[in-house]
Image: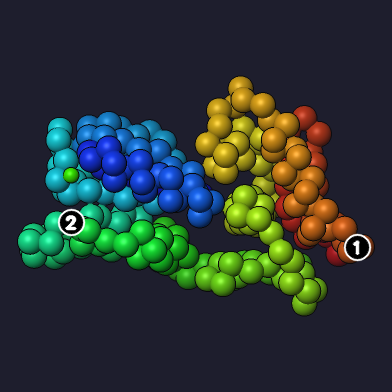
Amino acid sequence: MKILIIEDEPKTGKFLKKGLAEAGFVADVAADGRDGLHLALTESYDLVVLDVMLPGIDGWGVLREMRRAGKQVPVLFLTARDQVDDRVKGLELGADDYLVKPFAFSELLARVRTLLRRGNAGQVLEITKVADLELDLPRHRVVRAGKRIALTVKEFALLELLMRRQGEVLPRSLIASQIWDMNFDSDTNVIDVAVRRLRAKIDDGFDVKLIRTVRGMGYILEAPEP
Ligand code: CA
C-alpha cells in the first residue's frame, strides 16, 4: 500500500513517513503543492495525506486538480484548528476525511486504515478471502483453515498486496515499490526471501498451495482450479 504525503513542514513529513513505514506502508513525501500534484497525477497511490496550507499550489488547488483529472484516490486532509470552514470546503471538493492539527499519530493511522478499507469505490474491504485463507484487516489477523498465522508487519503487507490482487502475476519490481520502497534495480533478493518466508507460513502443511512463483515474471496468489 502506497501513500503520498503532501506536507511542507519537513518535521511533520518525516514523522509521518517514518510512522507509516513502521505500520507497513510505503510513503512518498512532497514538500509543496506543485510537486505533490505532479506525483498524485503521475504515480499510483492508495491514499493521499494532504496538508491545506502549502506553498506553490495550496491543498485545495491540489485536490481540485486531482479530482478534475479523474483521480479517485482517497484523500485525508490536514487542517489547522482555527480554520473552521476548512472541513466543509474540503469535503465539498471531494476529500474523504480530515484531521485537525496537531493530531496524535495513532489517530492518523486509524483514519488511514479506515479509508484504505473503504477503497476507491467506497466499498468496505474488511476481510479478503482466497480459498480457506482469510485476511482480516481491521484486526490485522491472518487465518488459514481456522488456524491463526502470525506474520511480521512486512509479511502482512506483502500478503495483503498479493490477496488484493489475487490471480494477477505481480512482478518483483511492483512488490519492491509497494512494500519496500525500493527501485527495480535494487537487490530483489529481499523480495524472494520474504516471499519464501511468507509461503512457509501460509502454504507449508497444506495440500493446496496458494502462492506460486511464475518463472521470470514474479509471484501470484490464487486458489487453484477445482
Ligand atoms: Ca503547511
The reply, left or right, for residue 195 in relation to residue 46 is right
**Which residue was labeled with disc 1?**
205
Rendered image quadrant of residue 136: bottom right
Where ligand 1 lies, by quadrant?
Answer: top left
**189 to 213, vertically: above or below:** above
Residue type at tag 1 = Gly
Please name whichever residue, 21 or 121, is drawn nearer the observer in this view of the structure. 21
Q: Residue at x 61, y 32 (%)?
A: 173
Please name whichever residue, 200 or 74, is drawn nearer the observer in this view of the structure. 200
Residue type at tag 2 = Thr
Q: Residue at x 36, y 48 (%)?
A: 16
Q: Residue at x 80, y 41 (%)?
A: 213
Q: Residue at x 44, y 63 (%)?
A: 113
**159 to 196, vertically: above or below:** below
In terms of secondary structure, where does tag 1 sit?
loop
Please name whichever residue, 169 or 99, is drawn nearer the observer in this view of the structure. 99
**Which residue was labeled with disc 2?**
79
Quadrant of the image containing the C terminus: bottom right
The reply, left or right, for residue 15 in relation to residue 9 is right
Residue lying farthest bottom?
146
Q: Earlier in the sequence, mark 1 or mark 2?
A: 2
- Can residue 133 be seen here? no
Spatial CA span between label 1 and label 2: 50 Å
Q: Position of residue 115 (x, y in %)?
A: 40, 63
Mark 2 packing: few (<14 Cα in 10 Å), some, or many (20+)?
Answer: many
In terms of secondary structure, where does tag 2 sit?
strand
**50 to 126, vertically: above or below:** above
- Can residue 10 be seen here? yes
Please name whichever residue, 58 or 119, is drawn nearer the observer in this view of the structure. 58
Q: Is mark 2 within 8 Å of ligand 1?
A: no
The reply, left or right, for residue 77 in relation to residue 113 is left
